[in-house]
Amino acid sequence: MVVGAATLLATGRVFGIFELFVLGTGAAGLAIVGAVTVLRRQVDLDASRSVHPARIHVGADSRVELSVTNRAHRMSPVVAVRDTVALVPPSGGSADATADSRITGRRRQARFLLAPLAAGQQNRASYRLPAERRGIFVIGPLRAEVNDVFGLWSKVTTIAPSIELTVYPAVEVLASAMHSQGDDPTSGAPRPASVGPTGEDLYGLRPYEVGDDLRRVHWPSTARTGELVVRQLELPWQGRATVLLDVRATAHTDATLEAAVSAAASILAAAWAEGALVRLTTTDGTDSGFAAGHTHYEAVMEHLAVVGPGRADGLEAVVGGLHRAGNGGSLTVVTTAAAPGGDLDGMAGLHGRFATPTIVVVDTPAAPMAPAPPPMGATLLRVTAGSALAPIWNRVFAGTFLRASSWQ
């Protein structure tokens, strides 16, 4: 409008066309009036925003609640409130980067028209946010926009900072695979087995394993042998579940990576619901260690929410680390049909340290590979990306206790 007004005024002046001069003056007047109107519309809004729940699984919905209060001493104008929603890419850049700098791709937007508010008056609104894919979604910042009556000028003010919504991978209800005997002598026990009625009788001494309570270290025996030894007051149930997730970029397409991450999350969720110590390792070097608390479970799921294809091939180092002492219980490997056969044999070779390993192989839906014989000493399950794992998994582990759990 400003450029057009200047052009009309200049043309009318040069060629002496009075009508053009009048049109240019009118256009300039509209621009000036609009600018003055926007500048006079003072916006002093105090907004708060929350998301409930802040952590959900794919397929669930979250709700964003908005609350806006007019802090000015006079009535506010009509305001357009905009809230953007954007996905942080997998493995989203530097940990020190700001939320906005990590975002790439298209932003979605929720828009509200806020009616005039009297001084001190508050208004509330909410909108539903469906979780269609895993990741961390940055919501905001929340901005208020005022416009002039001609739609020529606008003034935007940030009234609330950004918040985040974490979307965990989709999970299926699976039977637990922990109850199979391996190198860990207590991995197959379905429940605690006390020696005495109180569970505090001394059962014996055994080497320290990752996850044991350091308060039970038997220091005289530790000093004599040079290795940590703990008192075993009862024959405890100490289910341990390790999931090795193959995230090598050379082995995955987008579809197989999502299916593999979902399978790993489902297996870990089933073990955690049984009260087991769970552990996630990936071929890019991530190792969560064994733990059973809710905080540990959320940390594992948050990593699965953002994990992307890894450029480095650390499978050999990860398998070598799993061969060391301190490992035990059940082991599930989630990989793809593009993994070389030698890799599967190396994973199956862990049966000397763990119970019989279970290898879940994800096929591409477009061109599934021909069935291959399972590696020696392992159970092989094949699933196509986009199809359910639960029917195949639960047929194999049909004798295992299956129950609904808190993560549903």
Image: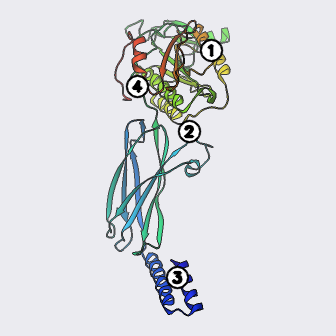
Pinpoint residue 287: horizontal percent, then vertical percent.
59, 26
| Residues tagged 2 and 3 counted as in contact (Cβ below 8 A) | no
| Residues tagged 3 and 4 counted as in contact (Cβ below 8 A) | no
- Which amino acid type corresponds to the residue marked 4 in the rendered image? Glu
Local secondary structure at mark 3: helix
Q: On the image, numbered disc 4 is attached to which residue?
A: 172
Q: Residue at x 46, y 38 (%)?
A: 133
In terms of sequence position, does the residue under pointer 1 or pointer 3 come before the other? 3
Number of marks = 4
Locate residue 70 relative to residue 300 in the image: left or right.
Answer: left
| Residues tagged 1 and 2 counted as in contact (Cβ below 8 A) | no
Pinpoint residue 139: horizontal percent, then vertical percent.
46, 50
Of the two numbered discs 2 and 3 in the rendering, the one whose residue sits closer to the viewer = 3
- Which amino acid type corresponds to the residue marked 2 in the rendered image? Pro
Q: On the image, numbered disc 3 is attached to which residue?
A: 5
In terms of sequence position, does the residue under pointer 2 or pointer 3 come before the other? 3
Q: On the image, numbered disc 2 is attached to which residue?
A: 90
From the viewer's perspective, is residue 77 above or below residue 21?
Answer: above
Q: Residue at x 46, y 76 (%)?
A: 39
Question: What label sits on residue 351 in the rendered view?
Answer: none
In terms of sequence position, does the residue under pointer 3 or pointer 4 come before the other? 3
Q: On the image, numbered disc 1 is attached to which residue?
A: 341
Of the two numbered discs 1 and 3 in the rendering, the one whose residue sits closer to the viewer = 3
- Which amino acid type corresponds to the residue marked 3 in the rendered image? Ala
Of the two numbered discs 4 and 1 in the rendering, the one whose residue sits closer to the viewer = 1
Q: CA distance from mark 3 to mark 4?
A: 64 Å
Local secondary structure at mark 1: helix
